[in-house]
Image (spheres, rainbow, N blue to C red):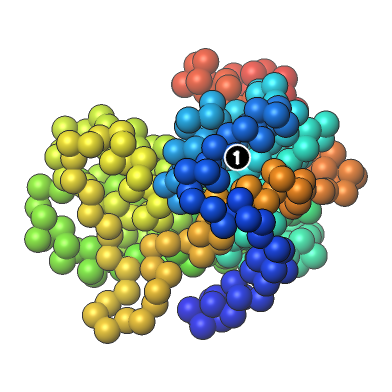
Amino acid sequence: MNNNSLAKKVETQAAPASCAPTTAVASAAPGALRNEIKRMLIEQNAVLVAHYYTAPELQDLADETGGLVADSLEMARFGHAHAAKTLVVAGVRFMGETAKILNPEKRVLMPDLDATCSLDVGCPADEFARFCDAHPRRTVVVYANTSAAVKARADWVVTSGIAVKLVDYLAKRGETILWAPDRYLGDYVRKVTGADMVLWQGACVVHEEFKADLLRVLRRQHPDAAVLVHPESPAGVIEQADVVGSTTGIIDAARQLSARKFIVATDSGILHKLRQAAPEKIFLEAPTAGAGATCESCARCPWMAMNSLEKLYDVLKYGRHEVVIDESVRRRAMLPIKRLIGFAQAQTAAPAVEDDARVAACR
Ligand code: 13P
Ligand code: SF4
């Protein structure tokens, strides 16, 4: 998708939700807004779960109110385990849908239901079903950045934090894989595991913009910097990484590596948490477009940016933007997500798990 068509898409998708009238409080000073949101979270037995790419004020609010700022896997796990009756998910649509799929009895609200993801948009359920039909013997593994309907067709759902481990596990059982939708992450997983994989050709509009040649130049200018890369990036960028990881993996690496300086190839929203996690270290954004480029959304997900304090206020005040999923789709989509959670738990308990029984137990 080029930047013009992306801008058009965002414009079109943003319209309905942003047209909702904002109240006096929603246009008040940020302090008053934050206090009012905090009050409503308690009053409504609600918890705020935010992704690392959302605005700093949303991340801080989640931290201050007993919620969570995390990657997509942890967001799903936290929401599932939490006792709150309402989950408020600040992120993109698939994250809210995952929360609803796992927690049908809870109310799941999002600041903006039109906040989607290019991977989700680029993998329509009907086309994906035809792709699966063309490869009936393959185990279907889909990335979490997909619609509920696509997940409903999958055997497994994965996040970037666990994709390599899961595909390695399946390959060792002799399974061949149909992977969707991110072709860069799929290619990376295939190289690391050696698994037999056919790939859907989707991409993230943010990570696809990182440029390998410009990264080489920046590394020459900062030879002391370690390079941290999200695996949705192109192969030439991944090849230069000291650490390839999910958003949580990137933050952990910045904390743990001895380097004082890092070049970071993922959405720049993560810089807020990186600076909190390692305030004494220096973080440089990996280069996206070359000199003279006009792209204004480089390294910034346009859909994550649709989340705001004002919208969060309105959502709690008026119960707007509740995630609703067809029950038969939800039930089917829940199975591969529960498998993911069970597999992730087994990995935490015994990282070198080879034991089919552990995973079979969560099927
Ligand atoms: P994580 O699973 O690493 O949070 O990534 C989600 C995402 O959308 C990355 O672009
Ligand atoms: Fe989707 Fe990319 Fe935005 Fe992540 S950063 S939500 S993969 S468009």
Say if residue 60 shows up in the picture: yes
Left or right: 330 in relation to 203: right
Q: Nearer the viewer, residue 360 or 205?
A: 205
Give the answer, above or below, for where 264 lies relative to 250. Answer: below
Q: Which residue is mark 1?
A: 37
Q: Residue at x 83, y 48 (%)?
A: 325
The extreme right residue here reads 328
Q: Residue 13 appears at what percent x and percent y?
A: 67, 70
Badge 1 amino acid? Ile
Quadrant of the rendered structure where residue 102 is?
top right
Work out which quarter of the rendered image holds the N terminus and state it.
bottom right
Q: Residue at x 60, y 53 (%)?
A: 26
Q: Residue 289 appears at what percent x and percent y?
A: 32, 74
Q: Residue at x 69, y 48 (%)?
A: 315
Q: Residue 83 appears at what percent x and percent y?
A: 70, 21
Confirm or reject: label 1 Cβ below 8 Å from ligand 2. no
Q: Residue at x 76, y 61 (%)?
A: 125
Q: Residue 189 appears at what percent x and percent y?
A: 47, 48
Q: Nearer the viewer, residue 238 or 39?
A: 39
